[in-house]
Image (cartoon, coloured by chain):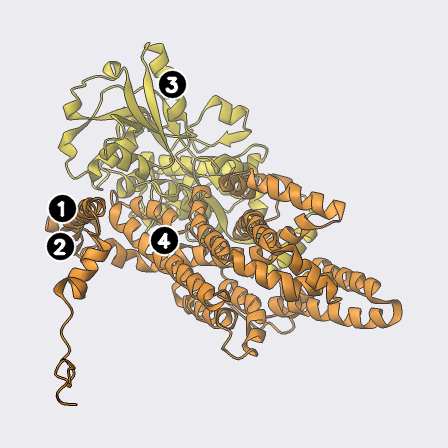
């Protein structure tokens, strides 16, 4: 055997990979200089990035966090460095607007609780019981932000309870359909006509032009904060999250409505979607700010933030509907037929078979709309709300910081980037997780 | 998220719908807060400081009215309004009064159904240009690009001025003053036009003010003043005479410093009537007789408010000019307190 000298008997030692096939050189060659066109583009792009950084970094790093006004800052650092002092000086305002300082733990708590409420919706590994909290969160969050008597959220919640009781009673006596109609009627009547007086009786009322303030029976509550004190990032988040949470279900309903066989439902959905998509958001915001006040009886103050949330929701819902319709249209007819063949009724087939697939297809579009909606909240500065962009104006309106621009906008851009980038990463995670193809 | 608030408001709206609006004074007193529309941020006239407290020359008028009506200059809810939405906000009752560098014009007074209650600042529209543009007069601006705030009288004045002088221009429409400033500095327009007070304030904030000049032409009259809705004369009277009290106080030498001394009674019967030690002027307004005293104690007289917010000692550095008292060659003139 040993005579067969052409067979190697020992293993060759491992050789390091050739220089061009490993490490940074390999990566560079593969990704940046794989051919001459790619090479040119890489060099030009890197030169551009280097140039921007060359202009930006010294300005940003040499900037100072000290000083209470732009004049002082410019004297100290000269014209070529950033005056980050404005961020330090106005940080609280950029976060909370005019929200009373002593109460600012409330929006912070509301934000943390929002993360808790959203977590079980985003990650299905968390215990399902947490969804109970998510369902209650809108009431907790609104109460924390606006404050006032504890009875407001409780009594509004009671509306659902009343609806449920009415449904159970009427269902047994009169059947399903009548039960549902009666339950909805009872809830709406409770909300429209009874909630106000009951809350007033329990929690007390404020003085109006015609009546003095009355003490409540059980005046438990926290200090109420007016909508006009809302501002900064907190306002953007309030409008953004409410808009996102409300527009999603509305969008699903509109998308289903548009595909419906029922003439009225379909017509209404189509008209709504096409009308809203044909109108710029700014126009809707002006309607919210200006026109609604004319339509409502004089003296009524219909909360401005609420008006804006409604408009933003209506706007986003129309886009959402079209994106989800795209998902519905992408499903093969076989899926609908399979659902029918299983004997599922319309709602069950939608809930169990169609929607999970359609929504999965639509994830990128849906998250895109969410991100767009969140960024669109800055448009409210045009109707005078003090969101971060609106505040830049107010901050520059003081003699201390008149003329300051880049520092503020950069800071706001970073704040928004954190939120929008997280949303975008989550959507990629979700797409990977729901990936069922091969 | 907002359901609770929504339903609450809806319920409240339903309840309130039945009542006709009482007088603005009653509304304000019942609410115990004055809703005052101000700029979203204009140096010297209205802006919130780091603690969210509004300050400025226009803000002083709001505080003066609150001091007169509610006895406390802090009981003001400031509603920041852009120039586009200010009139609808006032007309729809969202604010009780507007003190927002608003020019008194015929159509606003008559057609839009507002009542202007005086002039707290006499302004005029001017032009600012870079010195290296080599322009010495506004008549040489043919073909220039002009940064201009939309929805204001300056926009209309500009069109009128260029048309009557047979010149052409390219407007760069802009939403806010701060934005205009930035556009002008970045070279998006050759000329920045707005009220000359704002031009001076803007120029003062530039890194190199010496490179820019305000042209000598003033092309318009811009009497800026507070306004209220037409049809509530009592309320209009209160706002009007609040401003007049500030002007009269300066004329009579009543300041926030010597107020107590003056209020103890003086030989000048007009001072006594103003400060309520003689006569019942305050009661005629539907207030009490100390109303003017409270105004001067809270914001000072007209001259003090001017100096504190936009005067020569501030970075804005405006001289009194047209806004001096009539005795000193200016236009500020209050009817007598009699």
* Residue under numbered circle 4: B53
The colour one sees for chain B in the rendered image is: yellow
Q: Are marks 4 and 2 on the same chain?
A: no
Find the distance from the CA under tag 2 to the CA under tag 3: 45 Å
Asked whether B154 or A285 is in front, the reply is A285
Task: Confirm or deny contact between disc 3 and disc 4 (CB under 8 A).
Answer: no
Could you tell me which chain the residue with mark 1 belongs to? A
Q: For the residue carrying disc 2, how many other residues have a C-alpha within 10 Å: few (<14), some (14-19), or many (20+)?
A: few
Residue A401 appears in the picture as rendered: no
Find the distance from the CA under tag 4 to the CA under tag 1: 31 Å
Find the distance from the CA under tag 3 to the CA under tag 1: 38 Å
* Residue under numbered circle 1: A80
The earlier-in-sequence mark between 3 and 4 is 4
Q: Residue furthest right?
A: A173
Q: Which chain, by letter, is orange?
A: A
| Left or right: residue B130 compared with residue B235 | left
Task: Confirm or deny contact between disc 3 and disc 1 (CB under 8 A).
Answer: no
Residue B159's disc is 3
Vertical side of A264 occupied by A181: above or below? below
Could you tell me which chain the residue with mark 4 belongs to? B
| Total numbered circles | 4
SS at mark 1?
Answer: loop
Q: Position of residue A105 (x, y in %)?
A: 41, 69
* Picture quadrant of residue B226: top left
Task: Confirm or deny contact between disc 4 and disc 1 (CB under 8 A).
Answer: no
Find the distance from the CA under tag 4 to the CA under tag 2: 31 Å
Could you tell me which chain the residue with mark 2 belongs to? A
Residue A62's disc is 2
Asked whether B218 or B150 is in front, the reply is B150
């Amino acid at each position: 055997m040993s005579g067969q000298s052409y067979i190697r008997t020992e293993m060759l030692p491992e050789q390091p990979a050739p220089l061009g096939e490993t490490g940074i050189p390999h990566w560079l060659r593969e990704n940046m200089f794989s051919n001459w066109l790619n090479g040119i583009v890489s060099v030009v792009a890197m030169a551009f990035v280097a140039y921007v950084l060359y202009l930006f970094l010294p300005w940003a790093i040499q900037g100072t966090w000290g000083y209470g006004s732009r004049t002082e800052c410019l004297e100290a650092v000269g014209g070529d460095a950033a005056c980050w002092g404005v961020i330090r000086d106005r940080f609280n305002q950029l976060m909370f607007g005019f929200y009373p300082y002593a109460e600012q733990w409330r929006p912070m708590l509301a934000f943390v609780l929002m993360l808790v409420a959203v977590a079980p919706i985003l990650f299905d590994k968390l215990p399902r019981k947490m969804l109970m909290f998510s369902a209650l969160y809108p009431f907790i969050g609104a109460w924390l932000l606006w404050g006032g008597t504890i009875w407001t959220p409780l009594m509004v919640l009671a509306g659902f309870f009343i609806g449920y009781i009415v449904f159970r009673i009427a269902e047994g006596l009169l059947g399903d359909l009548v039960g549902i109609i009666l339950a909805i009627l009872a809830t709406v009547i409770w909300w429209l006509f009874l909630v106000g007086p009951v809350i007033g009786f329990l929690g007390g009322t404020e003085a109006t032009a015609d009546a003095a303030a009355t003490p409540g029976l059980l005046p438990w509550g926290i200090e109420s904060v007016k909508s006009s004190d809302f501002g900064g990032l907190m306002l953007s988040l309030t409008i953004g999250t409410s808009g996102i949470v409300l527009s999603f279900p509305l969008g699903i309903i509109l998308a289903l409505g548009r595909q419906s066989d029922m003439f009225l439902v379909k017509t209404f959905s189509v008209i709504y979607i096409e009308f809203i998509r044909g109108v710029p958001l700014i126009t809707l915001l002006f309607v919210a700010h200006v026109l609604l006040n004319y339509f409502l009886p004089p003296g009524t103050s219909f909360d401005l933030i609420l008006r804006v949330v409604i408009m933003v929701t209506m706007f986003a819902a129309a886009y959402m509907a079209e994106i989800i319709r795209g998902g519905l249209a992408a499903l093969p007819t076989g899926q609908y037929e399979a659902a029918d063949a299983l004997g599922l009724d319309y709602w069950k087939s939608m809930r169990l078979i169609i929607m999970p697939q359609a929504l999965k297809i639509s994830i990128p579009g849906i998250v895109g709309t969410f991100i767009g909606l969140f960024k669109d909240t800055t448009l409210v500065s045009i109707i005078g709300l003090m969101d971060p962009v609106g505040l830049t104006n107010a901050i520059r309106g003081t003699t201390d910081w008149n003329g300051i621009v880049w520092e503020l906008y950069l800071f706001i851009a970073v704040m928004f980037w954190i939120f929008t980038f997280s949303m975008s990463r989550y959507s990629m995670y979700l797409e990977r997780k729901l990936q069922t193809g091969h | 998220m907002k359901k609770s608030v929504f339903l609450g408001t809806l319920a409240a709206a339903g309840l309130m719908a039945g009542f006709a609006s009482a007088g603005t004074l009653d509304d304000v007193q019942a609410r115990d807060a004055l809703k005052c529309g101000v700029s979203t941020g204009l140096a010297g006239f209205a802006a919130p400081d780091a603690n969210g407290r509004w300050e400025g020359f226009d803000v002083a008028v709001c505080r003066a009215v609150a001091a007169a009506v509610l006895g406390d200059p802090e009981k003001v809810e400031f509603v920041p309004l852009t120039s586009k939405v200010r009139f609808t906000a006032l007309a729809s009752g969202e604010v009780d009064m507007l003190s927002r560098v608003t020019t008194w014009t015929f159509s606003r007074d008559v057609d839009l159904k507002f009542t202007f209650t005086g002039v707290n600042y006499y302004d005029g529209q001017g032009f600012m240009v870079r010195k290296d543009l080599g322009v010495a007069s506004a008549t040489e601006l043919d073909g220039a690009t002009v940064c201009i705030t939309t929805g204001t009288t300056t926009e209309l004045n500009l069109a009128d001025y260029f048309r009557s002088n047979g010149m052409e221009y390219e407007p760069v429409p802009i939403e806010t003053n701060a934005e205009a400033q930035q556009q002008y500095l970045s070279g998006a327009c050759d000329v920045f036009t707005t009220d000359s007070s704002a031009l001076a304030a803007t120029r003062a904030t530039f890194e190199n003010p010496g490179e820019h000049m305000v042209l000598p032409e003033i092309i318009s009259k811009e009497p800026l003043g507070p306004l209220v809705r037409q049809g509530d004369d009592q309320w209009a009277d209160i706002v009007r005479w609040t401003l007049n009290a500030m002007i009269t106080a300066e004329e009579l030498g009543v300041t926030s410093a010597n107020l107590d001394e003056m209020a103890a009674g003086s030989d000048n019967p007009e001072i006594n009537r103003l400060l309520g030690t003689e006569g019942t002027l305050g009661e005629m307004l539907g207030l009490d007789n100390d109303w003017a005293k409270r105004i001067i104690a809270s914001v000072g007289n007209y001259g003090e408010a001017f100096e504190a917010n936009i005067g020569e000692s501030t970075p804005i550095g405006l001289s009194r000019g047209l806004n001096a008292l009539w005795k000193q060659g200016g236009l500020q003139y209050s009817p007598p307190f009699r």
